[in-house]
Amino acid sequence: MNVIVVFPKIENGRSIKSILVKHGFQVGRVCVTGAQALQCADGLADGIVVCASRLQDMVYGQLREYLPDGFEMLVLTAPNAWEKEPMEGVVCLQMPMKVHELVSSMEMIAYTLERRRRKRRAQPKSRSQEERQLIQKAKELLMERNHMTEEEAHHYIQKSSMDSGTGMTETAQMILSMIGG
């Protein structure tokens, strides 16, 4: 789980990191600005940002807006510092808070992210129209040249794809370039 802690005062960030690490969370980085947090999050599919409501360069709502979609936020804030309208992907905890509240909130968010990750993996990847056409051309070529049925041609591409560890689209491209001329 990718955890980024962002607080304007580095000591506060380090304290939160220490609590999280003691309770089994791996914190990737402690930042003091939203820009640093965004830089850390760039390239990651998902994770949790634990932050104050006000950072040195932005407020939590702005940070949420710029974070990749797979990220959730846990905002630790004074009771009057948060926007009253709920924001998607944001959980707020009022300060002062108890350690067990922080940990249970993090566990809840981590569980939600893990469920979302499993759901994403379980969904078959959809192919573009171009990819479907490429696979269809390779099947047609196999049917014509090797006298296969469409089902046999599809199975051949699928098996070759699995054996070579490449996707069906790549396998179809190889078939077309090798026997298609």
Image (tube, helix red, strand yellow):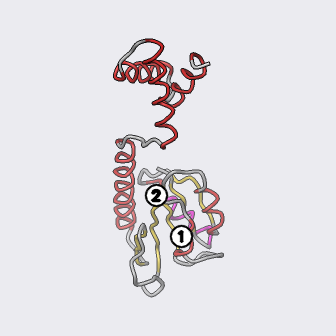
Q: Amino acid at mark 2?
A: Leu
**Circle 2 residues within 10 Å: few <14, some 14–19, many ≥20:** some
The quadrant in which residue 57 appears is: bottom right
Magenta residues, start to end: 9-19
Count residues near mark 1 (Cα–Cα under 10 Å), then give few for <14, some for 14-19, many for 20+: few
What residue is shown at x 37% (from left), y 50% (from top)?
114
Instruction: Give 89 or 94, whichever is nearer the viewer.
Output: 89
Closer to viewer: mark 1 or mark 2: 1
- Please tell me which residue is depicted at 56% across the width and 74% down the height of the picture: 62
**In the image, is residue 168 part of the stretch drawn in magenta?**
no
**Is residue 9 found left or right of 147 in the rendered image?**
right
The secondary element bearing badge 2 is classed as helix
x, y percentage for residue 151? 34, 22
Residue identified by numbered label 2:
20
Q: Is residue 12 magenta?
A: yes
Query: Are the residues tagged 1 and 2 within 8 Å (C-beta)?
Result: no
Q: Give coordinates of residue 113: x percent, y percent.
A: 39, 54
* Residue 2 x/y as whole percent: 50, 52
Q: How many marks?
A: 2
The residue sitting at the bottom extreme is 80
Relative to 47, say whether 95 is above or below.
below
Q: Amino acid at mark 1?
A: Glu
The spot of residue 22 in percent (x, y) is 45, 54
Q: Which residue is identified by label 1?
A: 65
Quadrant of the frame with the C terminus: top right
Residue in view at x 42 percent, y 41 percent: 125
Q: In front: 102, or 114? A: 114
Tell me how far mark 1 sits from mark 2, CA to CA. Answer: 24 Å
Magenta stretch, main secondary structure, is helix
Q: Residue furthest front?
A: 144
Question: Circle 1 — which element?
Answer: helix
* Disc with the residue nearer the chain's start (1 vs 2): 2
